[in-house]
Image: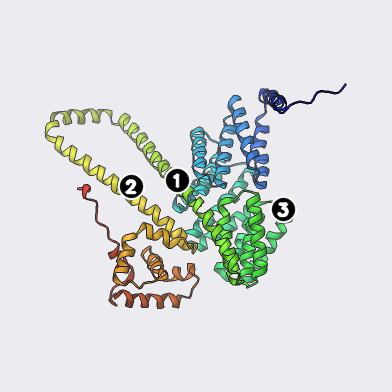
């Protein structure tokens, strides 16, 4: 007798019932802490490396619920930290900061140094990606502090990643020698393809030592042979090796490694690293005189970079909110301690204030107004600092979007320059922008891929075009044009 065929609705209903029964069975089990740790560390890492985002999120949310049910705080915190990493990796920084904040709230008062190390390492990386390098270094210092307190040798290997991240942060702030020191520290703790290839790239860019660079690339490729192909470490190693081939003017081979890098980054969902590869692909097609492909990848770069830029801006606000919350928390703790310690003194002050209340009322009100103005000024300074950090970040990457964003941030300065000389080109205005942001001639030469002598020549031409006296520094001349009047309601 033939069984009747199930319609589509019946199939969905039966599948749902099976999933619910399986889920109830799964969550009714009791898992050991060791098993939960294994799932949230080892299995999580395997899924993360292969870029299986959905499985990663499902795994961590499931074991977060299980950890809550079994009152296993470590598993709960680990799952929140992992979720923060997942969302940061795919460019959803606002979600990432939210999960990291939840992890920190649940971790407060604990003594698990590994979790503190992992948490602050993720905070540092998230702030680095959105261009807040000083904040990234601050969190990285906390991560190193707690990492050195870890007693288990295997867990101490996390310091390799923490040291490598610090090397990235230091390089972005111009501390090249210190960056190399921390790369070697990371390599001593645990050799990985990315750390090894980063050292190779460092010797290529800053040491101009092709032989040393080649030695470390050979070591990196040897380490890659032990890993799966679809591995983000392979993507970064291929990117750096592409740079090595580009420097040797082997543009066709360099392009091959760049394309492989993009393919792996897409597969492993390392979205925030792809614009960097698109940028060097554009440069490579330019060298190969392929204008069509150059424009195609420039468009891809612009679209993805704009999308990530919007996410960065939103996350910067989140990060600033967290700074404010931290400051308020510290102030609250200090106030509480002061109240307990100085109770009698405050009581006496209260009596004095009551007696002289009428006399001091006007003074107190004036102080409040001054304090409010100070806070407004501090907020504006922070906002300007964040804008400048973003512009400096783009300038260092020689990003085509740099001048557009600078013109939006400093429209009056650009207008004043054009009033002096309407014939100034976009390149000359961009050059002025880098000087106004504090870049030295050496740095302009480095990030603009030009000779130091060329920078000096451009400065001399600018002096003539802007009619700057020989005894006036160009930087101070530009800053004088950039002076902004305070708003009228500030008084």
Residue 229 image label: 3
Q: Earlier in the sequence, mark 3 or mark 2?
A: 3
Looking at the picture, how far across and down is residue 241, in whole percent? 64, 64
| Distance from the alpha carbon under mark 2 to that under mark 1 | 16 Å
Q: Who comes first in sequence, dot 1 or dot 3? A: 3
Find the residue positioned furthest to the left: 359
In this figure, which residue is indicated by the disc labeled 2?
Answer: 379
Q: Which numbered dot is residue 314?
A: 1
Is residue 42 visible from the viewing direction of this image?
yes
- Tell which circle, 2 or 1, labels the residue nearer the N-terminal end: 1
* Residue 190 vertical placement versus 359 (above, below): below
Residue drawn at x 29%, y 71% is 420
Q: Is residue 148 visible?
A: no
Q: Is residue 84 above or below residue 353?
A: below
Q: Position of residue 142 (x, y in %)?
A: 49, 46
Residue 445, disc: none
Q: Would you call the spot at circle 1 few (<14 residues within 10 Å), some (14-19), or many (20 or more)?
A: some
Label 1's element?
A: helix
Please state, as top left, top right, bottom left or bottom right, where the N terminus lies in the image.
top right
**Nearer to me, 452 or 339:** 452
Say few, some or many: other residues with alpha carbon within 10 Å of mark 3 (under 14 / 14 to 19 / 20 or more): few
Inter-mark Cα distance, 3 to 2: 47 Å
Q: Position of residue 4 (x, y in %)?
A: 80, 23
């Amino acid at each position: 007798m033939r069984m009747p065929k199930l319609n589509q609705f019946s199939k969905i209903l039966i599948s749902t019932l099976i999933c619910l029964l399986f889920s109830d069975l799964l969550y009714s089990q009791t898992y050991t802490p060791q098993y939960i740790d294994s799932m949230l560390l080892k299995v999580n890492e395997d899924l993360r490396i292969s870029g299986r985002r959905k499985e990663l999120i499902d795994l961590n949310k499931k074991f977060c619920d299980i950890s809550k049910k079994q009152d296993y705080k470590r598993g709960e915190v680990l799952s929140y930290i992992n979720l923060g990493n997942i969302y940061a990796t795919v460019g959803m920084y606002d979600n990432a900061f939210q999960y990291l904040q939840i992890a920190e709230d649940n971790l407060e008062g604990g003594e698990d140094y590994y979790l503190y190390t992992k948490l602050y390492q993720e905070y540092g990386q998230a702030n680095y990606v959105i261009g807040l390098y000083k904040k990234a270094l601050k969190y990285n210092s906390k991560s190193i502090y707690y990492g050195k307190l870890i007693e288990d040798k295997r867990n101490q290997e996390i310091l390799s990643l923490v040291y490598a991240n610090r090397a990235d942060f230091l390089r972005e702030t111009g501390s090249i020698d210190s960056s190399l020191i921390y790369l070697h520290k990371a390599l001593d703790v645990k050799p990985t393809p990315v750390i090894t290839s980063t050292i190779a790239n460092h010797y290529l860019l800053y040491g101009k030592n092709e032989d040393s660079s080649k030695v470390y690339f050979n070591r990196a490729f040897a380490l890659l042979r032990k890993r799966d192909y679809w591995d983000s470490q392979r993507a970064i190693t291929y990117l750096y090796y592409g740079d090595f081939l580009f420097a040797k003017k082997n543009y066709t081979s360099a392009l091959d490694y760049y394309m492989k890098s993009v393919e792996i980054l897409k597969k492993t969902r390392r979205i925030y690293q792809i614009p960097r590869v698109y940028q060097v692909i554009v440069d490579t097609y330019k060298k190969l005189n392929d204008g069509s492909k150059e424009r195609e990848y420039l468009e891809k770069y612009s679209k993805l970079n704009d999308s990530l830029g919007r996410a960065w801006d939103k996350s910067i606000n989140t990060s600033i909110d967290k700074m404010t919350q931290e400051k308020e928390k510290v102030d609250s703790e200090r106030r509480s301690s002061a109240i307990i310690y100085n109770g009698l003194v405050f009581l006496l002050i209260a009596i004095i204030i009551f007696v002289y209340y009428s006399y001091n009322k006007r003074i107190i009100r004036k102080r409040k107004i001054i304090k409010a103005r100070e806070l407004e000024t501090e907020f504006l300074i922070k906002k300007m600092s964040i804008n400048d950090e973003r512009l400096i970040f783009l300038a260092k990457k020689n990003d085509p979007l740099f001048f557009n964003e600078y013109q939006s941030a400093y429209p009056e300065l650009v207008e004043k320059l054009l009033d002096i000389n309407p014939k100034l080109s976009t390149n000359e205005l961009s050059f002025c922008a880098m000087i106004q942001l504090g870049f030295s001639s050496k740095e302009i030469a480095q990030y603009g891929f030009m000779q130091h002598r060329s920078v000096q020549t451009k400065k001399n031409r600018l002096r003539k075009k802007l009619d700057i006296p020989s005894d006036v520094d160009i930087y101070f001349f530009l800053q004088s044009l950039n002076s902004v009047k305070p708003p009228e309601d500030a008084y």
